Image (cartoon, coloured by chain):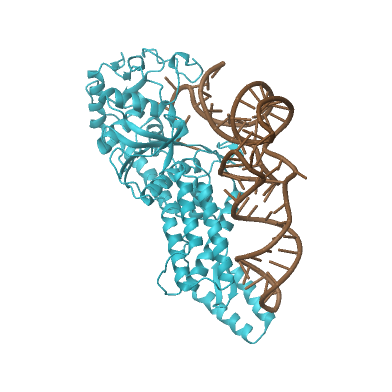
Amino acid sequence: MSLYVFNTMSRRLEPFEPIEAGRVRMYTCGPTVYNYAHVGNLRAYMFEDLLRRYLRFRGFDVFQVMNLTDVDDKTIRSAREEGLSLNMFTQRYKDAFFEDLRILGIEPADKYPAATDHIPQMIELIQRLFEKDLAYRSDDGSVYFSIARFPEYGKLAHLCMDGLRHGARVNQDEYEKEHVGDFALWKAWTEEDGDVGWDSPWGRGRPGWHIECSAMSMSYLGESFDLHCGGVDNIFPHHEDEIAQSEGATGKPFARYWMHNAHLIVEGSKMSKSLGNFYTLRDLLAKGYSGREVRYLLVATHYRNTLNFTFHGLDAARAALARLDEFRQRLRDTAASTGAGALPDWAAARQREFVEQMDNDLNVSGALAALFELVSEGNRLLDAGQLSAAEAAAVGELLSDWDRVLGVLTPAQEEAPPDVLERVAARAAAREAREWAEADRIRDELLAMGWSVKDTPQGPRLKRSA
RNA sequence: GGCGCGGUAGCCAAGUGGUAAGGCACGGGUCUGCAAAACCUGUACUCGUGGGUUCGAUUCCCACCCGCGCCUCCA
């Protein structure tokens, strides 16, 4: 069995085989740093994290690049509104972005190139496009890509540009373009750009959006690489344009596999600021949810399905995680300091199932089913006293292994403060004396302090309660 | 109009041409001083609707209904 992924280019499942055996070069479209990321953005980074983690789990050596778009209409406009330099403005959101990733357990990419640090590479790429006669300059000094001169244009999105609807979203003012579908490679400086601008052979200006991804992906990953990911909305025009620019300039295939995650909706509706269902990670943290709970919810739905993000779902995620945590704790209690023995057959069967499911285009639902089956079977054996310490340790190691992929199985350990421990000791004494009313009173007291206590054969067990 | 996705129990969500994984929630039970956790057990005679193919379809084909995305810079 090998890994199969759904390639947007072919619209079918394909066996995943990188250009260079054992080594995967992937490019993932990153944030435009003009605002805090919302849960929809985060879903994309979560999908890419899951994909990269699974590739590593499968033994690939992965090199991932994620861009930071730190110059475009929105960043320029917002920076000016706040009276900040572009760099000062975007730095705030770059920092926030990395903080979000950390809280969500998203492992860092290997490179985070910022657009403003790669202007020369973009200019050079545009020059190559001029050499191939794929670019032209308009009267105002902007540079456009001519889709008419790139016959393969539309192959990713499966769009026929002749049928392009001349609708409201097409900017009718751009009369300087030869074709409505032509897109900007370089935008001439205008009054609204303020002090943002770079000198180029075509005059002062700034790069178009698409060119940054072509320039930066090729400079870090080579002219042909394996994987290119992003949200479905990027298929057209962004990724289509990247293909045109890159393959137009090099004459070589750009990315081998294109993978796109579906969007999410919130409480059944499209996320929008007017509906008040537009959440950033910090909004969710303020409501008392943890990054781990958010991660579980985002990771548990197959990346190509629309995900309905709900607070009920977050509560369900919390409950599911509690079950997983309980099981891991039981394994630890049983394994004590024993070394891991051989993995029992029943667990090995789940291990195979887990891989089989993930190999099928990251079927997480199936993988989670294998995980929960393992929990049920393990609990049953633990109840019956039929799981040896060495077996418990082996199963615990299996969970750690799976967590390299899922990243949700390790609870945040929180040490109880001294006053809580004192109450727990007092309750233990009361129970010893069979003073049940007093014991129950202290249990309620602890609950009010934010800790739940349960009695186990190994003594009282504390848990942070929500 | 074009391209594409989806409709499976109260909610989330897999899946297969042969009779429905898993999670959450809920009811009953075992255990417990009482709990908690865990375990056992009960919850879709049915997979949007109507046809068709087939010995047999939720799974294949056709039509229809409903929801959604993209069609120039939104993950």
Q: How far from the left and from the top, in percent, is residue A279?
A: 53, 44
Residue at (57%, 78%) from the top-left corner?
Answer: A457
Residue at (60%, 80%) from the top-left corner?
Answer: A427
Locate residue A82: give its quadrant: top left
Locate residue A192: give its quadrant: top left
Locate residue B18: give its quadrant: top right
The answer to whether A164 is drawn above or below residue B13 in the figure is above
Residue at (44%, 68%) from the top-left corner?
Answer: A393
- Chain B image colour: brown
The answer to whether A337 is drawn above or below residue A243 in the figure is below
Q: How far from the left and from the top, in percent, is residue A2?
A: 40, 44
Note whether residue A450 is visible.
Answer: no
Q: Is residue A4 left or right of residue A425?
A: left
Which chain is in cyan here?
A
Residue toward you, A50 or A85? A50
Residue toward you, A460 or A422? A460
The answer to whether B8 is drawn above or below residue A340 in the figure is above
